[in-house]
Amino acid sequence: MPKRLVAIGDLHGDLAATRSALRAAGAIDERDRWIGGELVVVQTGDQLDRGDDEQAILDLIFALETQASAAGGAMIMLLGNHELMNAAGDFRYVTPGAVRDFDDAPGLDRSKYPGAPEAVQGRIAALGPGGVYAKQLARHDVITIVGDTVFSHAGVLGDWVTQVDAVNLSSRCWLDGQAGGPDEPPLAMTSQESPVWTRAAGLDDVDCASVSSSLAALGVTRMVVGHTVQKPGITSACNGSVWRIDVGLGKLYGGPIEVLELADGAPPKVLRGTR
């Protein structure tokens, strides 16, 4: 378990809120440079959709990954359902201001999808399997375990606890362009109960017995998830075995800026930023 571990939920295209959350965590300064030292930050997916600043958010996170590693810390970004949806060409939740956000991405190869509508050619060439940004997303997992905590976008429950490696590998290979095109989705996209889709950990009536069984199978004591907006702010369930950190911090929702600190030997703590 790191000395300090901070979890940040869904960002949904809001760069200002992303910066505020990272500053609340003690990760970056006013110039977006890593100042967290050995701090470990886990962002639980859904960087894309519902906001206009998607490329800027990804670029910031990718830069922080390098800076954090050099300082002895870590910036760990996970994949959410919206990253996989965009790779599959599902742009239902793209804002008008973000449709062409990736048109000028370095290394963009539009020839891969010549039949795509001109308005989204840049986006699908960037985010579709094998695209320049998809290949960068392919360096990231759906599920990760840090210390005594399992992190995923939506929750790792039921039989999915036996498929952690398969979910991570299938998603990464697909995004990298090694496992089919947009219409051949990975394991994580094929079920509403998967670790990027389930709502079972985010709603009021959590099955705590199922949570307990999953944690035991994974060898951890706590699960942290995003995906389901918690309007009052960060919430917990099952006597602190589940923490829900999607507070709707993106502009569309206008929720609070809150992140979860998990310090070694201390109880979980909610840190707050400002808009």
Image (cartoon, grey):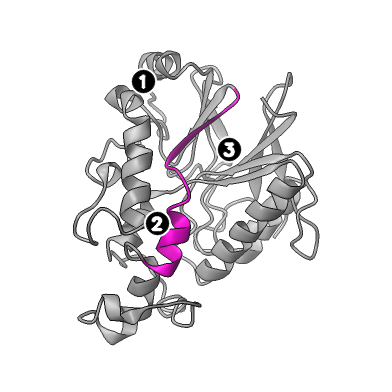
Q: CA distance from mark 2 to mark 1?
A: 27 Å
Q: Which residue is mark 1?
A: 207
Q: Which residue is mark 3?
A: 234
Q: Nearer the viewer, mark 2 or mark 1?
A: 2
Q: Is residue 245 above or below residue 66?
A: above
Say which residue appears at 31% left-offset and 44% top-offset. Answer: 170
Return the disc, 2 or 1, that comes first in the chain's sequence. 2
Q: Is residue 138 above or below residue 8?
A: below
Mark 1 surroundings within 10 Å by alpha-carbon count, few (fewer than 14), some (14 through 19), many (20 or more):
some
Image position of 37 (left or right of 255): right
Residue 122 visible at all: yes
Residue 218 placement: quadrant: top left
Q: Residue at x 57, y 54 (%)?
A: 249
* Residue 208 on image: x %, y %: 41, 17
Q: In x, y percent, where is residue 18?
A: 63, 58
- Residue type, mark 2 in image: Glu
The answer to whether residue 134 is magenta is yes
Question: What is the CA distance from the residue labelled 3 to the residue labelled 1?
Answer: 19 Å
Left or right, 237 with respect to 259, comes to: left
Please state, as top left, top right, bottom left or bottom right, where the C terminus lies in the image: bottom right
Residue 209 vertical placement versus 48 (above, below):
above
Q: In the rendered structure, which segment of residues is drawn in magenta?
A: 131-147
Mark 3 or 1 closer to N-term? 1
In the picture of the structure, the residue carrying the numbered disc 2 is 83
Dot 3 crowding, Cα within 10 Å, few <14, some 14–19, many 20+: many
Give amino acid for label 3.
Ile
